[in-house]
């Protein structure tokens, strides 16, 4: 028998991130994605996904060192959502608390150390001087896992306004489809687009505010096969910044309208969410 061929070399750590968290297959053209820079996660909770992110991006044997990993959380659970914004019961104030700020020490040990922490409500911690005070470097990857529109909006606007996002930065969203797939009132289908609520709404707003051109690089934000639309079990989505600061912008969501509708109606996870979760407007 001939010599077995070697497994193909990973072209970028994001390819493993898409598979491990997961978000689907990485698109082929990844040459312009950043291969160095800091990694930021907003919404750490108990640190499960942060540990995976650290393992993936700390792949030194492939020449992809990470300068620093940053974790942002209150460790007291979720804050209240912006009044009037749609939300769900499991995202109410205090949910997902790992036990208060004192839990940070055990979480730090669990993820292997080496993380720089910013602990507290984003309204108080994400200030214009934070980057310089802490020596933060431009982002290679930003993970938005804070669910709520309020938190996602604050995190994204601060990252862009602080100059930490640039061409080649990848931004990943953990809960891009949750609210869209949740049950709403009758005749409210138009509000079921991801850009109408939560993390997706924050993404759409930062696109316009900073003149960003995004491109979907993996997950259900790009055209998908009929089988994937039905059986895809994750709705993590990943976008790369291709340009910014110009007169035009593009949110990068490339899934055709008919596939978006099919995903909402036929996707297995979306249907389970629709049966289990009901949205309501956050109260002031």
Image (cartoon, helix red, strand yellow):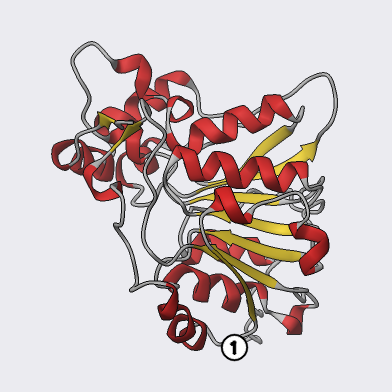
Residue drawn at (75%, 84%) of the image: 61
Q: Is residue 137 visible?
A: no
Residue drawn at (57%, 56%) of the image: 143
Indicate left or right for 66 with 78 as reference: right
Residue drawn at (61%, 56%) of the image: 125
Is residue 197 or residue 240 the one in the foreground? 197
Is residue 4 or residue 263 the one in the foreground? 263
Residue 220 percent coordinates (x, y): 47, 40
Indicate left or right for 134 with 196 as reference: right
Q: Residues within 10 Å of mark 1 (few under 14, many from 20)?
A: few
Identify the residue position indicated by label 1 in the image. Answer: 1
The quadrant of the picture occupied by the C terminus is top left
Residue 9 percent coordinates (x, y): 70, 72
Asked which quadrant contains residue 198, the reply is top left
Asked which quadrant contains residue 86, the reply is top left
Residue 87 percent coordinates (x, y): 31, 36
Indicate left or right for 224 with 54 as reference: left
The quadrant of the picture occupied by the N terminus is bottom right
Residue 36 percent coordinates (x, y): 81, 66
């Amino acid at each position: 028998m001939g010599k077995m061929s070697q497994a193909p070399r990973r072209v970028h750590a994001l390819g493993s991130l898409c598979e491990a968290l997961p978000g689907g297959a990485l698109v082929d053209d990844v040459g312009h994605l950043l291969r160095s820079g800091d990694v930021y996660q907003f919404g750490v909770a108990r640190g499960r996904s942060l540990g995976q992110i650290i393992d993936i991006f700390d792949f030194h044997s492939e020449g992809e060192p990470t300068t620093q990993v940053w974790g942002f959380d209150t460790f007291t659970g979720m804050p209240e959502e912006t009044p009037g914004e749609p939300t769900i019961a499991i995202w109410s104030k205090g949910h997902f608390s790992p036990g208060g700020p004192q839990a940070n020490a055990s979480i730090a040990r669990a993820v292997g150390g080496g993380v720089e922490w910013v602990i507290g409500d984003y309204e108080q911690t994400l200030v214009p001087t934070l980057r310089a005070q802490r020596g933060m470097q431009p982002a290679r990857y930003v993970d938005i896992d804070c669910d709520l529109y309020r938190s996602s909006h604050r995190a994204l606007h601060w990252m862009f306004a602080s100059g930490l996002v640039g061409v080649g930065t990848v931004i990943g969203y953990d809960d891009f489809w949750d609210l869209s797939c949740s049950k709403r009132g009758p005749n409210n289908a138009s509000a079921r687009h991801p850009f109408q609520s939560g993390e997706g709404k924050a993404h759409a707003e930062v696109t316009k505010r900073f003149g960003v051109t995004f491109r979907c690089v993996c997950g259900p934000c790009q055209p998908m096969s009929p089988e994937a639309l039905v059986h895809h079990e994750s709705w993590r989505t990943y976008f790369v910044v291709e340009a910014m600061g110009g007169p035009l912008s593009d949110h990068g969501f490339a899934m055709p309208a008919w596939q978006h509708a099919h995903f909402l109606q036929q996707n297995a996870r979306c249907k389970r969410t629709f049966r289990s979760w009901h949205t309501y407007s956050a109260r002031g």
